[in-house]
Image (cartoon, grey):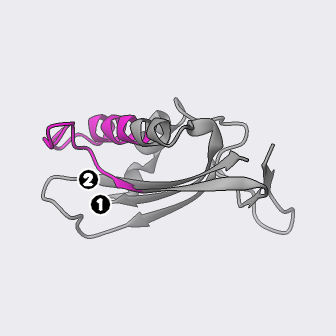
Amino acid sequence: MPSRFISPPEIAPANGYTHVVEVTNSKMIFISGQVPLDLAGNLVGADNLLEQTQQVFKNLQSALTAAGTDFNHVVKFTYFLLDISQIPVVRTVRDQYINTAQPPASSAVEVRKLFREGILIEVEAIAAVPL
């Protein structure tokens, strides 16, 4: 496996993410922030974080597939949320796509606003695909 998931004993235990992911001998895939827009550019799940997150992860899956990979190779997520207290909703959806025994490294940031009115979440991803 080109990635090693590390939780150093000198750092407080992580809940739902890994502190360090070491990547070697891999092609790196960087996916721009995905938002809850469908193929026609329509907002999915107005005022509904669960539905928006489901669409975001469908979009991430499409991006990964287009790059010839899948969620098994994601090593890092960055979440941008209007309400960080809702991160458990995001994790519920994310956990349907990832290996929860070795979750990717993650950052979550609460923001005042995203690029379009009504969007509650945006997610970036980085994948490492073995060479």
Q: Amino acid under label 2?
A: Leu
Pick whichever, 58 or 87, lies toward us: 58
Task: Tell me, yes or no, whether the two marked residues, 1 and 2, touch with CB atoms within 8 Å.
Answer: yes
Q: Amino acid under label 1?
A: Leu
Q: Which mark is residue 82?
A: 1
Q: What residue range appears in magenta?
A: 32-60
Horizontal and vertical percent position of residue 27: 65, 54
Tell me the quarter of the picture where residue 100 sits: top right
Residue identifier under label 2: 120
**Tag 1, which secondary structure?**
loop
Residue 37 belongs to magenta span: yes
Question: Going 45% across and 35% down the picture, which residue do you hit?
Answer: 93
**Sequence-wise, which precedes: disc 1 or disc 2?**
1
Pick whichever, 48 or 94, lies toward us: 94
Pick whichever, 89 or 1, lies toward us: 1
Tell me the quarter of the picture where residue 71 sits: top right
Horizontal and vertical percent position of residue 32: 40, 58
Question: Going 19% across and 37% down the picture, which residue do you hit?
Answer: 44
Q: Is residue 63 left or right of residue 5?
A: left
Question: Going 35% across and 42% down the picture, which residue do you hit?
Answer: 56
Most extreme residue toward the top, as rendered?
A: 96
